[in-house]
Image: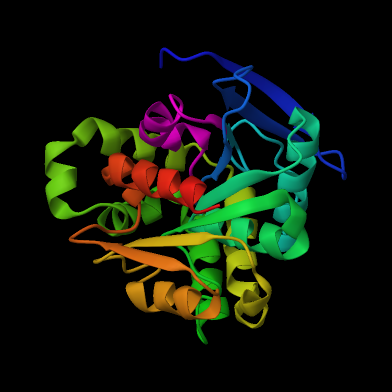
Amino acid sequence: MTHQQESGRAIARDGAALHYTLHGKGRLGLPRIVLVHSLGMSEAVWEGVVERLVPQACVLTYDCRGHGLSAKPPGPYRLEQFANDLNDLLTHVGWSSAYVAGASLGGSVALQCAILYPGRVQGLGLIDTTAWYGPEAKERWEWRAREAEEKGLPSLIEFQLSRWFSDEFRQKNPEAVARCRAIFLANDVASFAASCRMLGDFDLRARLAGIRCPTVIVVGEEDYATPPEMARVLESGIAGAILKIIPKARHLTFVEHPAVIAELLSQLVQMS
């Protein structure tokens, strides 16, 4: 990246250290956008989106607790805890409010943050995410946690790659696929399992009606992890929300289609 950036560590209220990067630091008067990554990933996966946003915004990326270069305290984890982390990080960098966009796990964190700290969130970007993983969520996420604990993260990688990216993208972009694979395999197993169990436990559907900020929702047409039906629940639950479905895309649309995601986030800023 050629833009100005600054990395640092913020300390959350429970003492956990959060690694973050400010992109476009020091440019006054620009919109402020936070990007929250998906399960098993890190802030690095936002590179393509950040490059497109930085000419017109200051962007904050970070590693959620249990991920990347951030602290990996023992579980159990709670979604409220991840939202508290984001609130504490905003305080640390001196941002009173921001547009908050998250993918998958990160989208659920963004939702929870908008519910707990509505004054912080100027607008919501909900990417390949959901307010609830369904009636079998607890059992399915428990299975994934146990697979990681008992067989290791490599046992999950082929399952993940086919869900993350379309067949065509995997064939044409082996370097991007390899990078996401490496980030996933570098995870701490205990933290990954705790994050899985957290995703099996939360349900924010009843709180959607209380969200009042501008909201854009995007999902891949072939997303098997958080399918379009889940995105439509978000759209119908949040007043004024706009939904875009990306044809032939799967779960990591922000890697496969960064220009589309950046454009939607630019639209979100303009909606305010």
Q: Is residue 249 magenta?
A: no
Asked if residue 263 shows in the view, the reply is yes
The residue at the point 32 percent across, 54 percent down is 164
The residue at the point 49 percent across, 65 percent down is 144
Q: Is residue 44 magenta?
A: yes
Q: How many marks?
A: 0
For this rendering, which residue is in front, 109 or 188?
A: 109
| Magenta residues, start to end | 41-59
Q: Position of residue 33 (x, y in %)?
A: 56, 39
* 250, above or below 23, in the image: below
Q: Position of residue 143 (x, y in %)?
A: 50, 71
Q: Position of residue 193 (x, y in %)?
A: 59, 57
Please state, as top left, top right, bottom left or bottom right, where the N terminus lies in the image: top left
* 272, above or below 52, in the image: below
The residue at the point 19 percent across, 61 percent down is 247
Residue 23, located in which quarter of the rendered image? Answer: top right
